[in-house]
Image (tube, rainbow, N blue to C red):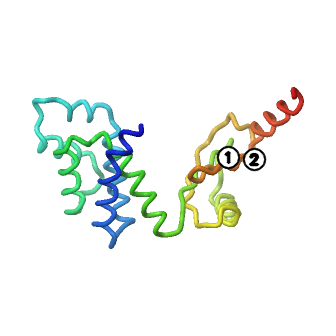
Amino acid sequence: MAELATIARPYAEALFEASRGDLPGAQHWLDALAAAADEPQLLQFAANPKVNAAQVFQVVTSVLDKPLPDLGANFLRTVIENDRLAALSSVAKQFRELANEQGGRSDAVIYSAFPISDADLGALKTVLEKRFGRALEASVHVDPELIGGVRVVVGDEVLDTSVKARLQQMKSALTA
């Protein structure tokens, strides 16, 4: 949603500036808040006109693993008071992009037909970092439809070496 991204941008930028001393820590609690805010029941509860901001804050903080630092608690209160709970996922994504940009790294989503061992992931990550020219924070998602190989998404770049992609290329070549 472009609208949520537009709403989230000033929150992400303000939080980025406020948390420059501990970007990984802020990212951690922001991701936890985003995961909580992705729950439809929580959003429905927050939208109830009979529920006040303090009650929403209490419910959100009660589902977190660890208590929020002062910055996180103040940030959450601001988001709730401005009725922007639904934008937290976009805030977290944009915050991560800002932090990655500052650190010269990017997020990489690796889709694989099979689970990847830690040793293989390390080797693959090294090759991908050379290919993309920057440090990568890799996450792996298993997608059996790929048949074999991997599909890597880094920002708006895609590297698809999956069997499924190769079969589609062959099909296109044969039908052309």
Residue at image position (48%, 69%) is: 103
Question: Which residue is label 1 attached to?
Answer: 151
Check disc 2 and report its element: helix, strand or loop.
loop
Mark count: 2
User: Observer-nearest residue: 79 or 62?
Assistant: 79
Judged from this view, the residue extending furthest toward the top is 175
Image height of 120 relative to 142, above or below: below
Q: Kindly indicate whether the residue at mark 2 contacts the one at mark 1 (C-beta within 8 angstroms).
A: yes
Picture quadrant of residue 131: bottom right
| Residue 52, position as x, y percentages in the image | 10, 38
Residue at image position (20%, 56%) is: 73
* Dot 1 amino acid type: Arg
Q: Is residue 123 left or right of residue 46?
A: right
Question: Which residue is label 2 attached to?
Answer: 161
User: Observer-nearest residue: 19 or 125?
Assistant: 19
> The N terminus is located in which quarter?
top left
Q: Is residue 175 left or right of residue 112?
A: right
* Dot 2 amino acid type: Thr
> Mark 2 or mark 1, which is nearer the start of the sequence?
1
Q: Is residue 126 left or right of residue 14?
A: right
